[in-house]
Amino acid sequence: MPGLSPIAQNLASILARIAAAAQNAGRKPEDITLVAVSKTHPPEAIAQALAAGQFTFGENRLQEAQAKFPDLLARHPKTRLHLIGALQTNKAKDAVKLCHMIESLDRPKLADAITTAAAAHGACPDLLIQINIGDEPQKSGIPTADAETFIRFMRTRFGPSLRGLMCIPPAGADPTPFFRHLTALADTHNLPIRSMGMSADFETAIHCGATHVRIGTALFGAR
Ligand SMILES: *Cc1c(COP(=O)(O)O)cnc(C)c1O
């Protein structure tokens, strides 16, 4: 594809793979949202993706997002920013102001901080609960044993702002059972969004019911 930036070429190929995976799974490509994970990459790379028609981005550190996104959001009003990494309670106010979606709601204290911040801001971003789907001690997320209770609690707390679930399955294992588990949990609670799948496994995630795939390396290159 001569004339296209490397990022535009990568984007076209990822979108084609998403569409093929959706079709293979009997699903509609338009029901799957690509979250372009731009962490560590400069605003110029994000601008290239925007120019190629990609509007939804994910950052895992709020401070980095604050440095990169206010400008891009002002220039490209269709841009949507998802926070996909751990959030400290003392940063909840800034996150609520800047982000359209927080994918990493993972503890009651953070829910309290988001509630306070959303009340002050006058609006609540969309929220996903991060589930520690492999119950790994080093990973954040709600342990699977506590998921049902926490989801119900957050539903009562946030109402329709609670949109779904997010997970990162254990590295080096077949992600299929973990992805299926997340989809089952979301189905049980009537939550429409399942954010799962990254560069290495997004097709499997789509097969297992992902509505949002978070892709960094395959789009922007190695970090
Ligand atoms: C970095 C990151 C991704 C993207 O990972 P790639 O393998 O580069 O596609 C997805 N989700 C989260 C939570 C991340 O931190």
Image: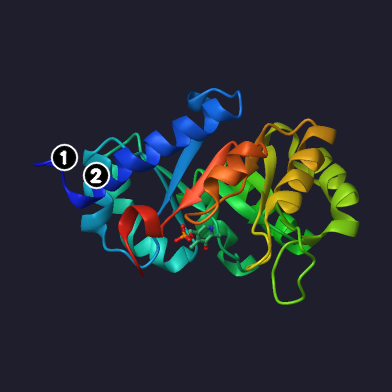
Whether label 1 touches label 2, CB < 8 Å: yes
**Mark 1 → mark 2, Cα distance in angstroms:** 7 Å
Kind of residue sitting beneath label 2: Gln
User: Which residue bears the numbered disc 2?
Assistant: 9
Residue 33 location (% of width, % of height):
49, 36
User: Which residue bears the numbered disc 1?
Assistant: 1
Q: Nearer the viewer, residue 27 or 191?
A: 27
Q: How many marks?
A: 2
Residue 91 location (% of width, % of height):
56, 65
- How is the protein colored in the picture? rainbow
Q: Nearer the viewer, residue 150 or 2?
A: 2
Question: Residue at left 21%, top 48%?
Answer: 48
Q: Residues within 10 Å of mark 2 (few under 14, many from 20)?
A: some
Kind of residue sitting beneath label 1: Met
Question: Residue at left 68%, top 64%?
Answer: 173
Residue 149 location (% of width, % of height):
90, 49
The C terminus is located in which quarter? Answer: bottom left
Q: Is residue 129 above or below residue 87?
A: above
> Which mark sits nearer the N-terminus, 1 or 2?
1
Rendered image quadrant of residue 85: bottom right
Question: Residue at left 28%, top 35%?
Answer: 53
* SS under mark 1: loop
Describe residue 80's horizontal placement relative to residue 85 as left or right.
left
* SS under mark 2: helix
Q: Residues within 10 Å of mark 1 (few under 14, many from 20)?
A: few
Q: Is residue 126 visible?
A: no
